[in-house]
Image (cartoon, grey):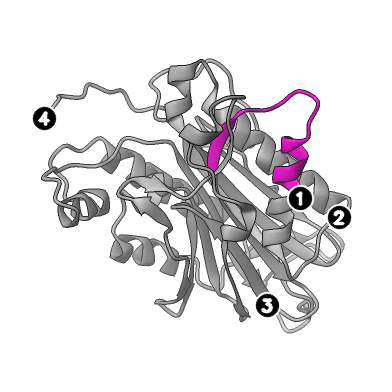
Amino acid sequence: MVSLTYRLLPILIFKEKANPSLCPRFVDSQKKRKFSAADPNIQRKSEPQLVSAVCGFSKEKKIHRLVKGQFGDDAWFSVKHKTADVLGVADGVGGWRAYGINPGEFSLNLMRTCERLVRLGCFAPTNPSDLLAKSYYELLFHKKRILGSSTACVVVLNRENSRLYTANIGDSGFMVVRNGRVIHKSEEQQHYFNTPFQLSLPPPGYQADVLSDQPDSAITDNFPVEDGDVILVATDGVFDNLPQNLLINELLKVQGERCASRLQTVANSIAWMARNLSFDETFISPFAESAFANGINTIGGKPDDITVLLATVTI
C-alpha cells in the first residue's frame, strides 16, 4: 500500500448559536436564580423543531480559503422556515479535477440554491426530492453553466405533522436513532462499487461519457419522529470510515439533548474520529469491508472530505 503522510487539521466548525433556553442551566436575569430546562415553570414548545450543529474537514492538508457551507468538495446547509426545518449535504465528485473543473463548486451551489428556495418558501415541506430537482434545474438553466457532479441528501422536518421527509441520491445519507436503536437509515445507491448515483452537469460534448442521474432517481421516505430523536446527516466520508456501532455510541450521548453547544461537542467528536480513521492504514473500515465484498483486497480507511450535520428533535 502507498504510505500516507498527513497532518491533522484544526476542527472546522460553523456553529449554530446556542439558545440559552435549550441548554441545561442558565440564569434568569430578573430573579437572579438558576433553574434547569426540566423546571415545570418552563413551557415546552408543542411545535417540533430541530436543534442542530455541524462540523467537518477537507481531506486536503492545506486549506486555501474557508467557505461557509463547504468542507473540501462537500457542501451543506441548515435552514429554518415557518413550516419546516431543513438539512442537506452534498458531495462533489472529485474526478472532475482532471478536466480542470472545481468539484466543490457544483455541490456548493446545489446546496446554496436549496437553502435559498427554502428561505423564499419555494418548496413543499413534504417533498425534499422536489426541492433537489428545483435546485438542480436552476443550475442547469443558469446563464453561466456550473459544471460538475454531486451526491445529495436532504431531510425536512415538517412542523405541521411531526414527520421527517427524506430524499437521497448516491452514498451521502442520514440515520435516525431513538433510544440507542437505528429506526431509519438511508439506502445507498451505487451503479457499481464506489460509483454512486449522482446529479451531473457535464461540459458540452461529454454528456454521453458521464454518469448522470435525474433528481427523480432519489430514494424518498417519510416517517413520524418523536421528541428526543437524534438525526445524523452526513457525507460518505463519515459512513465509509465509522462503523455503525461507533456512530450509535456517539449519537446516544445527545439523545433528547436541547443544548446546541453539547450537540456541537458530539458533532466535533464524530467528525474527528472519521478524520483520524480515514488515514489509518491498518483499520478495517466499512469502506474496506465493502471493497472486499466486491472482490477488492484492501485495508485501511478512505481519505475523504467529511461533513457531519447532527440534530435532535424537540417537541
Disc 1 to disc 2, how far (Cα)? 9 Å
Q: Distance between the residues labelled 3 and 4?
A: 46 Å
* Kind of residue sitting beneath label 3: Arg
Task: Name the residue that disc number 3 marks.
Answer: 163
Q: Residues within 10 Å of mark 1 (few under 14, many from 20)?
A: some
**x and y, in percent, of residue 149 in the image:** 54, 37
**Residue 171 in the image: x percent, y percent?**
44, 52
Q: How crowded is mark 2: few (under 14 residues within 10 Å), some or many (20 or more)?
A: few
Residue at screen point 47% across, 66% down:
186
| Amino acid type of the residue that numbered disc 1 sits on in the rendered structure | Lys
Among the two numbered marks 1 and 3 on one chain, the one whose residue lies closer to the N terminus:
1
Residue 124 colored in magenta in the image? no
Residue 102 seen by the camera: yes
On screen, 99 above or below 151? above
Residue 58 appears in the figure: no
Q: What element carries label 3?
A: strand
Which numbered disc flags the more N-terminal residue, 3 or 4?
A: 4
Distance Cα–Cα, label 1 vs label 3: 22 Å
Q: Mark 2 highlights which residue?
A: 122
At 68% from the left and 64% from the top, the residue drawn is: 156
Q: How crowded is mark 3: few (under 14 residues within 10 Å), some or many (20 or more)?
A: some
Question: Crowding at label 4, few (<14), some or many (≥20) Cα neighbours within 10 Å?
Answer: few
| Residues marked 1 and 2 touching at CB (< 8 Å) | yes
Instruction: Identify the mark at residue 134; answer none if there is no mark.
Output: 1
Q: How far apart are marks 4 and 1 (CA)?
A: 43 Å
Instruction: Say what amino acid the circle numbered 2 marks.
Output: Cys
Instruction: Estimate the spatial distance between the alpha carbons at disc 2 and disc 4, rounded to whole Å.
Output: 49 Å
Q: Name the residue under label 4.
A: 1
Q: Is mark 1 on a helix, strand or loop?
A: helix
